């Protein structure tokens, strides 16, 4: 039963045909590009400075500074302190700063302190949001004008405040005097 085959030869004498495996196709270049377009800042890591990326940036740690990418995902427990500019933004962690994005989603664990300029905004139950939101069709194209005061602008502002009457009608020295205790 177990020792011989029907033709009488022992089982172990049979020739074993090798299994032919088809060669695996190499990973496509688009799959390789998709994987290389994703960057991750892992938990326990802190980045200070400006981060700019073309693809997806996933944050599990902490970022202090400006963050620009096509897609940004801020995981639960992650922190970003600074401005974010993205096409798609998903927040599960904490953000303190201004957000400019076409599509913004605040997950239930999100905490955002700052203004959001967006085309689409989704806020799940239990998400925290302190600030203002403004629908803006050109959320990504909004020009950012840095506040830089030249000495000439400071002088013209100082002259403008000299001619403005004081709200309580008091002379300048009395307006800045400390109240009597």
Image (tube, rainbow, N blue to C red):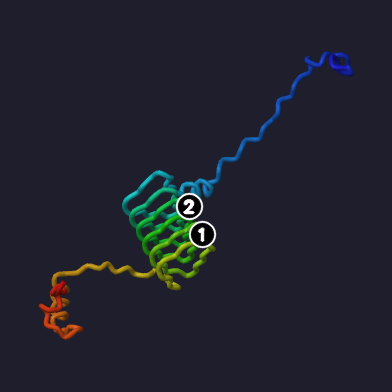
Q: Position of residue 162 (x, y in %)?
A: 13, 81
From this view, report whether residue 167 is shown above or below residue 102. Answer: below
Helix, strand or loop at label 1? It is loop
Q: Are marks 2 and 1 in contact (CB under 8 Å)?
A: yes
Instruction: Quickly name the residue at label 1.
Output: 107
**Quadrant location of the C terminus in the rendered image:** bottom left
Q: Nearer the viewer, residue 78 or 169?
A: 169
The single residue placed furthest to the front in the displayed view is: 181
Q: Position of residue 99 (x, y in %)?
A: 40, 64
Helix, strand or loop at label 2? It is loop
**Crowd around label 1: few <14 · some 14–19 · many ≥20 (10 Å):** many
In percent of the image, x 76 and y 19: which residue is there?
A: 15
In percent of the image, x 42 and y 55: which residue is there?
A: 54
* Tag count: 2
- Left or right: 74, with 161 as reference point: right
Q: Position of residue 180 (x, y in %)?
A: 14, 74
Q: Which mark is residue 76?
A: 2
Q: Report the Cα–Cα distance between label 2 and label 1.
A: 9 Å
In percent of the image, x 54 and y 63: which residue is there?
A: 125
Q: Position of residue 96 (x, y in %)?
A: 38, 60
Quadrant assignment, res 97: bottom left
Q: Nearer the viewer, residue 31 or 76?
A: 76
From this view, report whether residue 54 is shown above or below residue 145. Answer: above
- Left or right: 176, with 94 as reference point: left
In percent of the image, x 45 and y 58: which residue is there?
A: 70
Q: Nearer the viewer, residue 47 or 85?
A: 47
**Quadrant location of the N terminus in the rendered image:** top right
From this view, report whether residue 10 is shown above or below residue 91. Answer: above
**Crowd around label 2: few <14 · some 14–19 · many ≥20 (10 Å):** some
| Earlier sequence position, callout 2 versus callout 1 | 2
């Amino acid at each position: 039963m177990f020792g011989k085959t029907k033709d009488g030869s022992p089982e172990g004498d049979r020739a074993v045909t090798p299994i032919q495996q088809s060669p695996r196709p190499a990973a496509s270049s688009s799959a390789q590009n998709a994987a290389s377009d994703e960057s991750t800042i892992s938990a326990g890591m802190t980045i200070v400075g400006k981060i700019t990326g073309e693809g997806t940036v996933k944050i599990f740690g902490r970022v202090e500074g400006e963050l620009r990418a096509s897609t940004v995902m801020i995981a639960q427990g992650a922190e970003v302190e600074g401005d974010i500019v993205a096409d798609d933004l998903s927040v599960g962690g904490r953000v303190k700063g201004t957000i400019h994005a076409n599509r913004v989603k605040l997950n239930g664990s999100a905490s955002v302190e700052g203004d959001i300029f967006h085309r689409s905004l989704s806020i799940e139950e239990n998400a925290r949001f302190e600030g203002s939101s403004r629908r803006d069709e050109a959320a990504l194209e909004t020009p950012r004008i840095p506040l830089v005061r030249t000495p000439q602008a400071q002088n013209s502002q100082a002259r403008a405040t000299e001619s403005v009457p004081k709200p309580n009608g008091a002379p300048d020295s009395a307006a800045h005097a400390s109240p009597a205790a």
